[in-house]
Amino acid sequence: MGSVFSAIINGDLPGRFVWEDEDVVAFLTIAPITQGHTLIVPRKEVDHWQEVDGELWAKVMDVARIVGQAVRPAFDAPRAGLLIAGLEVPHLHVHVFPAYDLGDFNISNANPDPSQESQDDAMTKLRGALRDLGYADNVPD
């Protein structure tokens, strides 16, 4: 049985995608720490980040770096945060989010019910920032 992330990747569940390539996708989390909180997820199902092969790990982290470059200007954030928690879904994923202070690194402070308008706004801002950085080929419409 596939993970919930595989269902999102395959289009069986909705997702607000900001990045897609043949190996990795990025979509907004449904419970953001800050607006713009994005999950970087390999298409291949890997449970523990320590078990992923080096090439795919490098690709996941490169997309995380790129999304991190986009969240700062998109949300006027001084930093882009990065976390690997791995307790919520048994499918490797890296959290990238606008970070304003150290409290933003506490995933237990995530908003379990963000407004649809806030999420749509975040998706639009991130897609625009990624296009501005030159990654339009990987940004879905």
Image: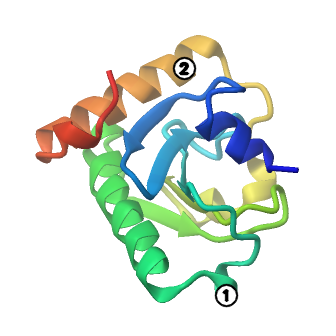
As drawn, the residue found furthest toward the top would be 117
Instruction: Please give the name of the residue rendered at 29% of the width and 59% of the height, measured from the top-left corner.
Output: 66
Q: Which residue is mark 1?
A: 50
Q: Nearer the viewer, mark 1 or mark 2?
A: 1
Using residue 104 as the reference point, say whether residue 109 is left or right of it: right
**Location of residue 78 with respect to 6 vertically, above or below:** below
Q: Nearer the viewer, residue 115 or 41?
A: 41
**Location of residue 30 with respect to 41 vertically, above or below:** above
Q: Which residue is mark 2?
A: 118
Compute the Cα span from label 1 to label 2.
Answer: 33 Å
The spot of residue 106 in percent (x, y) is: 72, 62
The spot of residue 77 in percent (x, y) is: 36, 49
The spot of residue 24 in percent (x, y) is: 46, 56
The three-letter amino acid code for the residue at tag 2 is Ser
Instruction: Please give the name of the residue rendered at 35% of the width and 35% of the height, measured from the top-left corner.
Output: 126
Instruction: Please give the name of the residue rendered at 36% of the width and 23% of the height, measured from the top-left corner.
Output: 124
The three-letter amino acid code for the residue at tag 1 is Gln
